[in-house]
Each structure stands twice: as structure tokens, then as C-alpha cells.
Image (cartoon, rainbow, N blue to C red):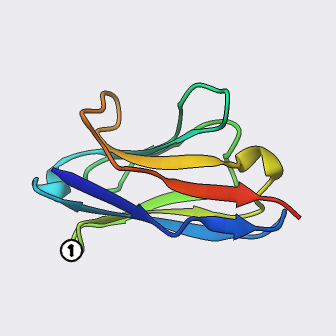
Amino acid sequence: VQLVESGGGLVQPGGSLRLSCAASGFTFRTYGMSWHRQAPGKERELVAAITSAGSITNYADSVKGRFTISRDNSKNTMYLQMNSLKPDDTAVYYCAKGRVTFDYWGQGTQVTVSS
């Protein structure tokens, strides 16, 4: 199993970024997936999760209305569209296989929100 995140970077407050998670080594379309983040000095937290078909999504209260999780099973890829970014969104973002329990993780991509 391999999960590779991309799309992180430096963005000003109020800006947008789209993260991608390319998956391989398992039957992507049959598994729920999730995005997590970890800020310096804080525990890793679940940001958003999506079912295998993409029909059900869940979000942390802190990102509801600003972030959108989606997936393209034909490309074995999951996305996180992040809008109206705030400095508190600064963290390393990880994708994970699973939406309730998580058995594989990507290496993470840094998102920094700063002026």
C-alpha cells in the first residue's frame, strides 16, 4: 500500500489549496478514506472522511463549510479542497486508508497559512 500526498504549500489567509492523495497497492474503490492533520505541538486530528463510493462525507466542525473532500475512483485519487484558509489550518496534512480505523498513512504534505 502506498499513499502519496501533494498540493501543500504556503498560502495567505483567505486563500485556497487543493490537496491530492494518490493511492496504490490496494483496491481503492472499495475503501473509505480520510484526511487528517497535525499542527506543531498538537495531536493529529481527523479533518474529513469519505465512503468508498463518495456518497457520504464527514467533517470536523473546524472545517465545515470551508473544506470539501472528494475522490475519483477511476484515478485512485482522493482530494481535499480547502477554501477560506486560516492561520489555524497550518499543519501537516495526511491521507489515510479507512474512515473509522486507519491502517495506512501517507508521508504528509505541509500547509502553511500566513501573510
Residue 104: tell me if it is visible: yes
Q: Is residue 50 visible?
A: no
Look at the image and tell me in which quarter the C terminus lies: bottom right
Give the secondary structure at mark 1.
loop
- Choose between 40 and 89: the one closer to the eye: 40
- Give the residue drawn at x 31%, y 66%: 77
Q: Is residue 54 left or right of residue 68?
A: left
Height in image: 101 above or below 27? above
Residue that appears at 78% across and 62% down: 84
Q: Residue at x 56, y 65 (%)?
A: 8
Q: Position of residue 39 (x, y in %)?
A: 65, 38
Q: Quadrant of residue 66?
A: bottom right
| Furthest-right residue in this view | 115
Mark 1: few/some/many CA within 10 Å (<14, 14-19, 20+): few
Residue 41 at what x, y percent from top left?
A: 67, 27
| 36 relative to 87, above or below | above
Q: Position of residue 9 (x, y in %)?
A: 63, 67
- Residue 98 lies left or right of residue 14; in this view the side is left
Q: Say which of 55 and 105 sits in front.
A: 105
Tell me the kind of residue under disc 1: Ser
Spot occupied by residue 55 in the image (x, y as percentages of width and height) = 36, 54
43 vs 33, left or right, is right
Q: Report whether 38 appears left or right of 70.
A: right
Q: Splitting the image into 4 quarters, where does residue 81 fall? A: bottom right
Name the residue carrying label 1: 74
Residue at position x 56%, y 47% in the image: 92
